[in-house]
Image (cartoon, rainbow, N blue to C red):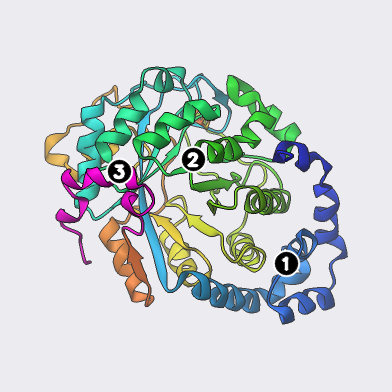
Amino acid sequence: MAAFSQVYPQLDIESLVRASQAQTTDAAVRRILARGRASTLAEFAALLSPAAAPHLETLCRLSQAITRKFFGKTIRLFAPIYLSNECVNICTYCGFSRNNPIPRITLPVEQVVREVGLLARQGFRSLLIVAGEHPKYVSNGYVEEVIRRCLPLMPSIALELGPLETPDYRPMVAAGAEGLAVYQETYHRPTYEQLHTAGPKKHYLWRMDTPERAYAAGFRRLGIGALYGLYDWRYEAISVAAHALHLLRHCWKAQINISLPRMRPAAGGFQPEHPMADRELVQTIAALRLLLPHCGIVLSTREPPALRDGLVPLGVTTMSAGSSTEPGGYSHAFDESNWTPHEDQPGEQFHIADERSPAEVAAMIRRHGYEPVWKDFDQSLVTPALFGRASQPAASTLATPTG
Ligand code: SF4
């Protein structure tokens, strides 16, 4: 079975982008919309075209109907927790890049558990564990210990770490993590090589096959995406769609989720050369839904409140809320009486745009007639060996806000 890194170079993404930009006709877009589904990458590219832009309302209506059919009127909520800003890579757009002169910190396990306790009190039962890329996280069992200690509070745990080999992932799955997210950042190889100048992240093809290595280790929720702003948004969206189609065929037991992060200001002052407009983001989300009706679509707090509110009924299935992108940041946000600023503050990876509390985001979702879902996964449903965890403090015993 060919890995995506072998398949992708044979896809002529440039031609699809050119056809989307210059050759798609109004009649071709209308034909796809009349059918209500995109069946091929070429049709997906047509839905991203300038010719499809005047049909955005129809596209969104179709996206809404398909999303409701397969996901109901629900939005799954999760919180990221940043374990560390130590990183061996230079990514020119990232605040944690190793050449940025910021204080570096890796949270002790006890502090992680305290932070996760704060998130649990806010209502979260779904956690995304994030860290920069550093060998010390994987060599000493730190990540596994964090997973094990957080699991009683957060039944659903996903990871966003530097790519690893399959055997390195297995202990993390055994510890209880069920999801893995890894974004290619940009699928455009020359741009990738220009932006990732040092560290293991330089290996474009190795990163590309990470979801498949994670699947082989047992992860059953795979997240992919591009960081919009680094290269042409149509090129990235078509590449992400191709990657998702490949994973649906080859990792068929996994739920595939697609994130659409756009560049935000960060330490280092990187300015994106290819900004993606709000309207283009909406068009991409709706087009993805017409091609990939079963894939989750994730929207983070990188996006401003008004845009996030508008996107709730249009195809998004999962949102973060009340996020901090700074290791130890929740203690500052939720526990201000216990914290005073100091000059060794590690700082954020990037600054979020939606600063509302989780309860405010949940209330907004309800105002749209949707149900915020704090927990839709339980280890015991899929892993009989983990039934024994029932004797640990149950997450459900913690208060869940209703706001
Ligand atoms: S994007 Fe990730 S790998 Fe790159 S510098 Fe930032 S934390 Fe490190």
Tell me the amino acid under the disc marked 3: Leu
Query: Residue 356 or 152: which is nearer the viewer?
Result: 152
Tell me the element at label 3.
helix
Quadrant hosting residue 54: bottom right
Q: Label 2 neighbourhood size at 10 Å, few (<14), some (14-19), many (20+)? A: many
Quadrant hosting residue 280: bottom right
Closer to the observer: label 1 or label 2?
Answer: 2
Tell me the element at label 2.
loop
Asked if residue 371 is among those painted magenta in the image, a careful observer would answer no
Query: Residue 177 or 115: which is nearer the viewer?
Result: 177
Residue at the limit of the structure toward the bottom, as seen here: 34
Query: Do the residues bearing badges 2 and 3 touch, measured as CB atoms within 8 Å?
Result: no
Q: Visible in this render: residue 333?
A: no
Q: Which residue is at 60% across, 66% downward?
A: 293
Query: Residue 331 or 142: which is nearer the viewer?
Result: 142
Residue denoted by label 1: 47
Residue denoted by label 3: 386
Tell me the element at label 1.
helix
Q: Reading the chain from its start, which is encountered first: label 2 or label 3?
A: 2
Q: Quadrant of the C terminus?
A: bottom left
Q: Visible in this render: residue 273?
A: yes
Image disc number at residue 218: 2
Tell me the amino acid under the disc marked 2: Gly
Q: Which residue is at 34% across, 70% downward?
A: 371
Side of 359 relative to 177 (left or right): left
Query: Residue 37 or 89: which is nearer the viewer?
Result: 37
Quadrant hosting residue 294: bottom right
